[in-house]
Amino acid sequence: MNAPKIKIFLVDDHPLVREWLTNLIHQQPDLLVCGESEDAPHALAAITASRPDVAIVDISLKHGSGIELIKNLKVMLPGVAIIVLSMHDERLYAERALRAGARGYIMKRETAKKVITAIRHVLAGKIYMSETLSAVFAEKFVDGKLPAGGSLVEQLSDRELETFQLLGKGYETRQVAEIMNISMKTVQAHCAHIKEKLKLTNAAELLREAVRWQENHPAG
Amino acid sequence: MLQFVNRLENRSRRVLITLALLIIALIGLVDYLTGHEISFSVFYLLGVALAVWFVGWGFGALISVTSVGVWLLGDFASGAQFSGPLVPIWNALVLLTFYLVVVWLLARLRLFHQELEAQVRQRTAALTDEMAERERLERELLEISEREQRRFGQDLHDGLCQHLTGATLAGQVLEEKLAALNLAEAADASKVVEIVEEGINLSRRLAKGLYPVELAADGLMLALEEFAATSRELFKVACHFECDSPVLFHDPVTAGHLYRIAQEAVGNAIKHGKARNILIRLDVSEESTGLSIKDDGLGLPEPLPEKRGLGLRIMAHRSGMIGGTFIARRETTGGTLIACELRAEARRKPPSQTPP
């Protein structure tokens, strides 16, 4: 008898993509598309019901956010390996998606050639990303820009940490200055030190890092 | 002189009437003191003119009659002798006629003057309306083009690109089926997939140009960062984006305009300024938030040509639409500085509990 097939669930708001992604996956004898959905709210229910091994999720959906869906899945169904399919540039969005809990990131223009490899990768328990992106991450790691377990944040002074936390909570530089009762110049100096200590290149990265840290340390 | 007339124009009627009467009395007194042999009749015109111009033709006529009376009285009082009783009457009538002609002329002139002023006011009002309307249309035009670009970009990104993705997937299925049959055509199918993938790349880049700023608050920082990277890649110039502390924009329209200003400025720096180094900055201080683009190119031509480049005009316009102050100048150190300063209130929004 045939071994039970590996089940894959698709979340994408474009029917043509879903249809041909299904056809492509079905070329593989051991893979089966067990369901599909075009929006986040419906997807969560359907995935919970069908219990797939892998979910392929487009993060920009017409209804609901793909990133939120990934976070929910990560909590509710940690056994489902998620691969993100996105039209967006991996340099800007892959880190976000992977940190939300995805195990793979594929840019849509490369899907055809890479999706099967990605599925195999995540099924084997590995993380899948393009070679370009792995190179970027490797470089960041070597430069110490990717903190191992947030240890770099511990190097911040109390005032810097407070700035970092407030930025992570969504306050703007000006509001941070008001809340901490210091001048904007001082906030900017704190930001500069934080960037230096956390080895971040720019303010956008600083903000992303602060928001991510805040999400992981909500009590702070 | 004009200032003096203007100052009189603003006085009340009572003051002016008193002034006219005083002048007549004063001239009458001088006339009497200088004796009847020296004629002072022409000086009474000062009071007459004042009366017509500032009070009206009726009062002008009254002052004329009074002037003639005062003049006649003065002459009699200073002991003038006439050969017959008709002579002073004749002289008085001639003088009165002369004064009345002046009154009539001045009254007409005054009327023309007033009509002209009314006309100028009317035209100015029409022109002001016209200018406001023009500005409104310009703004609307920019909004429409922005909206259309956004829509077009979104259609490209969400429609065409997805459709092409479907096509690459279908091509891949075909390739695998052909490969399973051991047919050499599998390589062709693979080529088709690559070509369509390149097509996705092209249309994505096109979409990015039309619809650059994502709606999240940190969208502008991300967009400018990506834009600087793309400019480096495409034009082989050192284009960098700097931002010391996070600058958030909760209004996508403001962010969109700032992005377009940066895009235009960088384009100009490369195309016209032949710049090698370009620095885009977002700065925030207590009072304002500023976008600036500095380059080391040829600098703006000085003085600016009559027909200022459309680019500069549109940048200034965009800046105005989001309530910003626009600066475009040649730097003393060479190169150009383009900047848009927004007052703090333009971006202020209460903090939300959820992170951006």
Image (cartoon, coloured by chain):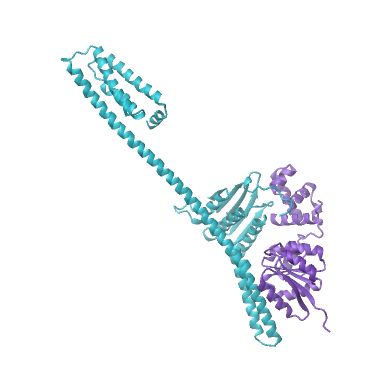
Chain colours: A purple, B cyan
Of A100 and B228, the residue lying toward us: A100
Location of residue B16 (image quadrant): top left
**In the image, residue B345 lies at what x, y percent?**
63, 45
At a point 73% along the width and 77% down the height, the residue shown is A25
**In the image, residue A139 lies at what x, y percent?**
74, 64
Residue A141 at least partly seen = no
**In the image, residue B298 lies at what x, y percent?**
52, 56
For residue B32, above or below residue B133: above
Location of residue B70 (image quadrant): top left
At a point 78% along the width and 73% down the height, the residue shown is A121
Location of residue A71 (image quadrant): bottom right
For residue B275, above or below residue B117: below
At a point 65% along the width and 83% down the height, the residue shown is B187
Of A142 and A128, the residue lying toward us: A128
**In the image, residue B91 lies at what x, y percent?**
20, 21
Direction from residue B295 to residue B104 in the image, left or right: left
Of B247 and A219, the residue lying toward us: A219
Please give the count of numbered marks on the rendered protein: 0
Direction from residue A171 to residue B48 in the image, left or right: left
Direction from residue A84 to residue A77 in the image, left or right: right
At a point 22% along the width and 21% down the height, the residue shown is B92
Residue B79 at least partly seen = yes
Residue extending farthest left: B83
For residue A53, above or below residue B336: below
Of A76 and A49, the residue lying toward us: A49
Q: Looking at the rendering, in which quadrant would you find the N terminus of chain A? A: bottom right
For residue B169, above or below residue B131: below
